[in-house]
């Protein structure tokens, strides 16, 4: 009798553990992103991607949702290195900031993840995942003074119908959002007023130097 009760308790425990495990989702986003093609800005720029940025994981465990752990660090590191690496005359990836900066930098760019949000198909009544990612962007001069701050907001969505799992669908939606972030970073950089003025001053200084060298 007692053995039967003990076995029943063990079976119930295994069932509960299995249910909890089934409700946890892990998503690791990988992505390769094409380099934009265009005329680079005449700047030498350092790029600092912090450990928090490069290893970023969004974790969520709410009563009305399953548990989700979403790692976007590797993908967004690839994205920002690729896009920023194509935007300037020279780009230097920095291992640390603000100490031990190489000489000759015009700017240092430091991105941070402000937030990541997503909706699931059952919440929107449409068979898609939707993702929003927001980045705080910071630009500093060689001395560490703030030159500009701006925000990049990215959006991505993907249907689940042709994908094998919710995890795959969400990963694809995040990749779409990251591509949107890259496009916004590339096209919107010079639209930031402080950066536009900074680039204009650099071009003016280079033009004056070239004129002086030719005289």
Image (tube, rainbow, N blue to C red):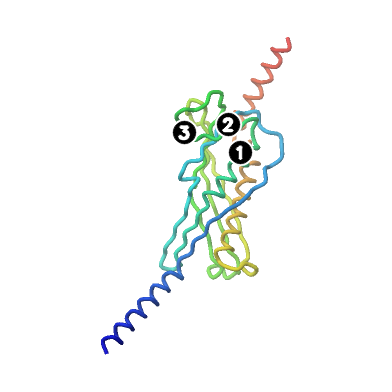
Disc 1 on helix, strand or loop? helix
Image quadrant of residue 132? Answer: bottom right
Q: Position of residue 191 (x, y in %)?
A: 63, 37
Vertical comparison of 172 with 127: above or below: above
Q: Secondary structure at mark 3?
A: loop
Q: Residues within 10 Å of mark 1 (few under 14, many from 20)?
A: many
Observer-nearest of 140 and 28: 28
Q: CA distance from mark 2 to mark 3?
A: 13 Å
Check the image and report above or below for 122 versus 103: below
- Nearer-N-terminus badge (3/1): 1
Q: Is residue 58 left or right of residue 13?
A: right
CA–CA distance in space, label 2 to label 1? 9 Å
Mark 3–mark 1 distance (CA, rounded to whole Å): 17 Å
Chain-order first, disc 2 or disc 1: 2
* Tags 2 and 1 touching, CB below 8 Å: yes
Q: Which residue is mark 1?
A: 84
Percent of width and height locating residue 104: 56, 23
Residue hosting label 3: 97
């Amino acid at each position: 009798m007692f053995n039967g009760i003990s076995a029943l308790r063990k079976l119930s425990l295994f069932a509960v553990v299995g249910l909890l495990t089934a409700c946890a989702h892990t998503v690791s986003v990988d992505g390769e992103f094409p380099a934009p093609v265009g005329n680079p800005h005449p700047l030498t720029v350092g790029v600092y991607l912090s450990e928090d940025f490069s290893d970023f994981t969004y974790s969520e465990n709410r009563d009305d949702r399953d548990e989700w752990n979403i790692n976007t660090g590797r993908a967004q590191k690839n994205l920002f290195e690729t896009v920023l690496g194509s935007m300037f005359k020279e780009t230097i990836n920095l291992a640390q900031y603000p100490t031990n900066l190489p000489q000759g930098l015009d700017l240092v760019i430091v991105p941070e993840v402000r937030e990541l949000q997503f909706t699931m198909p059952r919440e929107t009544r449409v068979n898609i995942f939707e993702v929003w990612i927001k980045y705080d962007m910071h630009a500093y001069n060689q001395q560490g003074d703030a030159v500009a701050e701006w925000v990049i907001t990215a959006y991505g969505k993907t249907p689940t119908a042709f994908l094998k799992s919710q995890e795959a669908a969400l990963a694809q939606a995040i990749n779409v959002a990251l591509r949107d972030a890259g496009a916004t970073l590339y096209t919107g950089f010079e639209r930031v007023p402080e950066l536009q003025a900074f680039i204009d001053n650099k071009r003016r200084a280079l033009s004056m130097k070239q004129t002086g060298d030719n005289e």
